[in-house]
Amino acid sequence: MLLLTHPACLRHDNGPHHPESPERLRAVLAALEAQEFSILVRAAAPEASREALLRVHPAEHVDRILSIRPPEGRSVPLDGDTAMNAHSAEAALRAAGAGVEAVDCVMRGEFARAFCAVRPPGHHAEPDTPMGFCLFSNAAIAARHAVAAHGAARVAVLDFDVHHGNGTQAAFWDDPALMLASSHQSPLYPGTGDASETGVGNILNVPLASGTDGAGFREAWEERILPAVRAFAPDLIIVSAGFDAHRADPLAGLRLVEEDFAWVTEAICAVAAETSGGRVVSMLEGGYDLAALARSVAAHVRALMRSS
Ligand SMILES: [Zn+2]
């Protein structure tokens, strides 16, 4: 199994006291230093090509993000909760590039699974708007790359981050080759993700009430999401792996524990074994309690390794 990351992802900083901090990725990488993860094949995430970015974002968005390179120690706010420092443009390119590289490796058959330990996250970045700590729509870019560069007929992005992946949804909205299936707390930021939002039949939103625990989460996946993914029969599954539905997370009110993330990962891998030759690319999204994030990523990666 492949693990992609890059030091630039540790240098991107939204500013002091911001929950989407470099410490998040430091905690994740420290957890993955444990002996049980020594068999992971580690590689540096390359920068995404302009061609790959343009499959999701208009040139104006790409040029805007890449043009914001403030001097060391300064930062430029993009909105109320997203900012860029001297290293953010490179981090955004590496985060998107990790997904593209993971897709290349998995679609070529070099690995069945890949995990991209990157930031900034991506699922809130809409085609023409950075938002919600996200600059480029990493999972959507990876999905479009699988279609354009590898001839995948159908790609599913499965998103268990506690927030709705509005950016992925916007990118996929009218593209029947791409499916987004998401469980998320509602009501909650960003306010989208109602069950009535279905695109061209390729979007499945399963909102969960604040306080939902692992049993309610597993029921949503077992009864709603996984059967729909099976019916879609993707050639590749991409996971928007956010861990902020953990009960310890400060930004939301779901009540999952590490075992729930392991369970959903194994369930996703089981569907992948049936429909996509076992191919799963997972990309880090949210997760803001450092200890819970580290334990949850370890449980997720352990499950990816176990079923590969
Ligand atoms: Zn989130």
Image (cartoon, rainbow, N blue to C red):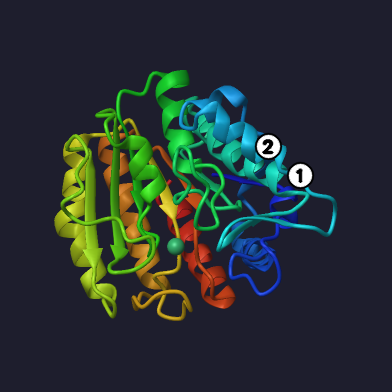
Give the CA distance from mark 2 to mark 1: 7 Å
Q: Which residue is mark 2?
A: 66
**Residue 38: % across, % down:** 65, 55
Secondary structure category for the residue under label 2: helix
Residue at 71% x, 37% y is 67
Neighbourhood count class around disc 1 (C-alpha, 10 Å): few under 14, some 14–19, many 20 upward: some
Residue 117 falls left or right of residue 12: left
Question: Given contact means CB atoms under 8 Å apart, are the residues at marks 2 and 1 in contact?
Answer: yes
The quarter of the rendered structure image containing the C terminus is: top left
Residue at 28% x, 80% y is 211
Report ligand 1 position as a quadrant.
bottom left
Count up the numbered dots: 2
Let me know if residue 278 appears in the view.
Answer: no
Seen from the viewer's position, the closer of residues 176 and 81 is 81
Vertical arrangement, residue 281 with respect to residue 9, above or below: above
Quadrant in the picture for residue 193: bottom left
Vertical arrangement, residue 177 with respect to residue 20, above or below: above
Secondary structure category for the residue under label 1: loop
Seen from the viewer's position, the closer of residues 88 and 238 is 88
Three-letter code, disc 2: Leu
Three-letter code, disc 1: Arg
Neighbourhood count class around disc 2 (C-alpha, 10 Å): few under 14, some 14–19, many 20 upward: some
The quarter of the rendered structure image containing the N terminus is: top right
Q: Which residue is mark 1?
A: 69
**Residue 105: % across, % down:** 54, 31
Residue at 59% x, 70% y is 19
**Residue 75: % across, % down:** 74, 57
Residue 281 falls left or right of residue 265: right
